[in-house]
């Protein structure tokens, strides 16, 4: 199993629109082969900073979802609501 840490920063005043679209991305990820679980957290010192921690069966499963047309399509609506590029870190247990 791997964990994927996704960090995003939402532009001011777009929080509710972002939340709505981000839920759709998560719903589609849940249906992707290899997805185990995930949660999204808000930074207590910066309410526009969102962190998603997702568990995937393998890095290959994550890569398949990350490269998928479905995720790319959903992200085209999400990216304009962010004021920074998302950062993704793939984590393995040591």
Image: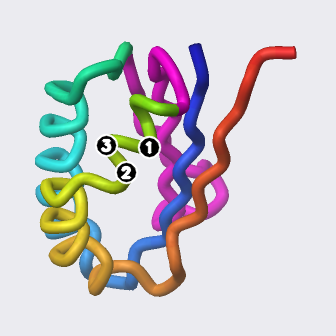
Q: Secondary structure at mark 3?
A: helix
Say which residue appears at 46% left-offset and 30% top-offset: 54
Alpha carbon separation for disc pair 2 and 3: 4 Å
Residue 20 at x, y percent in the picture: 12, 56
Mark drawn on residue 6: none
Name the residue tied to disc 2.
Answer: 66
**Closer to the camera, 49 or 38?**
38
Query: Is disc 2 surrounded by few (<14), some (14 to 19) or many (20+) residues within 10 Å?
Result: few
User: Mark 2 touching mark 3, by CB under 8 A?
Assistant: yes
Query: Is disc 1 surrounded by few (<14), some (14 to 19) or many (20+) residues within 10 Å?
Result: few
Alpha carbon separation for disc pair 1 and 3: 5 Å
Q: Is residue 1 one of those drawn in magenta? A: no
Q: Secondary structure at mark 1?
A: helix
**How are the residues colored?**
rainbow
Q: Main secondary structure of the magenta part?
A: strand
Name the residue tied to disc 3.
Answer: 65
| Image quadrant in which you'd find residue 94 | top right
Span highlighted in magenta in the image: 37-59
Say which residue appears at 51% left-offset and 68% top-offset: 86
Looking at the image, is 94 positioned above or below residue 30?
Answer: above
User: Mark 1 touching mark 2, by CB under 8 A?
Assistant: yes
Name the residue tied to disc 1.
Answer: 63
Say which residue appears at 14% left-offset and 39% top-offset: 28
Q: Quadrant of the N terminus?
A: top right
Q: Secondary structure at mark 2?
A: helix
| Image quadrant in which you'd find residue 13 | bottom left
């Amino acid at each position: 199993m791997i964990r994927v840490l996704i960090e995003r920063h939402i532009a001011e005043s777009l929080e509710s629109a972002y939340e709505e679209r981000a839920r759709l991305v998560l719903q589609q990820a849940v249906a992707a082969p290899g997805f185990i679980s995930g949660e999204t957290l808000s930074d207590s010192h910066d309410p526009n900073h969102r962190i998603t921690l997702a568990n995937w069966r393998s890095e290959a499963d994550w890569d398949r979802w990350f490269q998928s047309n479905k995720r790319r399509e959903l992200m085209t609506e999400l990216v304009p609501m962010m004021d920074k590029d998302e950062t993704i870190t793939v984590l393995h247990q040591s």
